[in-house]
Image: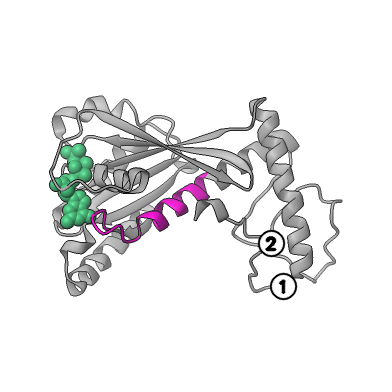
Amino acid sequence: NPNSVLLCLQWYTPEACLQFKDHFHAQLRTACQQSTGTAGLKISKVVVVGDVYVGKTSLIHRFCKDHFERDYKATIGVDFEIERFEIVGIPYNLQIWDTAGQEKFKCIASAYYRGAEVIITVFDLANIQTLDHTKQWLEDALRENEPNSIFIFLVGTKKDLVSDAVCERTELDAIRFANDMQAEYWSVSAKTGENVKEFFSRVAALAFEQSMMRELEKTTGHMAQIGTGNLIRLEQNLMEIPEGNVQESSSCC
Ligand SMILES: Nc1nc2c(ncn2[C@@H]2O[C@H](COP(=O)(O)OP(=O)(O)OP(=O)(O)O)[C@@H](O)[C@H]2O)c(=O)[nH]1
C-alpha cells in the first residue's frame, strides 16, 4: 500500500530508527517544498511499452480504475492516467503513459518516451513471442532517456490464462530476460487483479524514493541513500553512530 510505504533504514535500535525516520520524513517534506515552492507535489513519469494486445491498457485500468474490459480496444498513439498518492505526508503523483503496441502508431508513441523515470515493459504470459520483443521495446524507450536513472520492470500479464506449470516455465525465461534487461520481474492478471496493486505500489515506492533522494541531494548537498544498506548520510552531526555499532543484518522501521 503506497500510503503506508515506509522508508527502510538500517539502524541499531528500534527507538533510534523511529526517531531518525521522523526526522528523515520531515527533511523530505522540507526539501520537497523548497524545490517546488508549493505544497510539494511531486510527479514521476511512468511509460508502459510492449506488443499489441499484451494487456498494457488493461493493466493500467485495473490499477487506476479497478476495472477490467473484456473487449479489445486498441490504443491510438498514447493515453495517460494520473494516480495520486500521499507518501509520508507528501502529495505524490504517478503519471502513467499507456503507449500503443501497433506498429503504425509507434512513431507517435515514441515521442512520449522522453523524461521517463520508470519503464514498464509488458509481455503476455500466454504468448511467449511477445517476451522475445521486450528487449527491443526497452531499447527504444531507453534511447530517449538517461538509462542510469531509470527503473525498469518486466511484467508478464494474463496470468489467469496459463496453468501454474506453464507460468513457471515461462517465468524461467522471463527472469533470464529481466536479468539481461536489469529489470525487476512481476507476473500479474488484470482480469483477476492478482499482483496489480502490489506491483504499482512497488513502482510508486521506488520512483518516490528516487525523486526524494534527488531533492535531498539538491537542497542539502549531501549524498543520501536509503533502502540498500546503512549508508544514510544526511547531516552527519544529527545523530552520532558509534563505530562498529551498526548491525550487519537488515532491520526495517
Ligand atoms: N484473460 C485476460 N485477458 C486480458 C488480461 N489483460 C488484458 N486482457 C485482454 O487482452 C486484450 C488486449 O488488452 P489491452 O489491454 O487492450 O492490450 P494493449 O497491450 O493495451 O493493446 P494495444 O493498445 O493495442 O497496444 C483485451 O481483450 C483484454 O480484455 C488479463 O490479465 N487476463
User: Amino acid type of disc 1?
Assistant: Gln
Residue 219 lies in the magenta stretch:
no
Magenta span: predominant SS is helix
The residues bearing labels 1 and 2 have C-alpha atoms spaced at a distance of 9 Å
User: Taking 26 as reference, is 240 left or right?
Assistant: right
Which labelled disc corresponds to residue 105?
none
| Camera-nearest residue between 216 and 198 | 198
**Disc 1 crowd, CA 10 A, few/some/many (<14, 14-19, 20+):** few
Q: Residue 73: where, in percent of width, then height?
A: 15, 37
Q: Say which quarter of the image contains residue 180.
A: bottom left
Q: Nearer the viewer, residue 179 or 174?
A: 174
Q: Is residue 251 above or below residue 210?
A: below
Q: Earlier in the sequence, mark 1 or mark 2?
A: 2
- Which residue does the image show at 31% across and 61% down from the upper left? 194
- Residue 235 coordinates in the image, percent (x, y): 80, 47
Q: Which residue: 15% across, 59% down? A: 126
Instruction: Indicate the position of residue 13 as horizontal and vertical percent values.
Output: 77, 70
Q: Residue at x 61, y 39 (%)?
A: 214
In the figure, residue 83 lies in which quadrant? top left
Instruction: Give the residue at mark 2.
Output: 230
Circle 1/circle 2 CB separation < 8 Å: yes
**Magenta stretch?**
189-207
Q: Is residue 6 left or right of residue 185?
A: right
Mark 1, secondary structure of its residue: loop
Residue 247 is marked as 1
Position of 106 relative to 2 (above/below)? above
| Visible residue check, residue 131 | no
Q: Quadrant of the C terminus?
A: bottom right
Secondary element at tag 2: loop
In the rendered view, how is the structure colored? one colour
Disc 2 marks a residue whose amino acid type is Asn
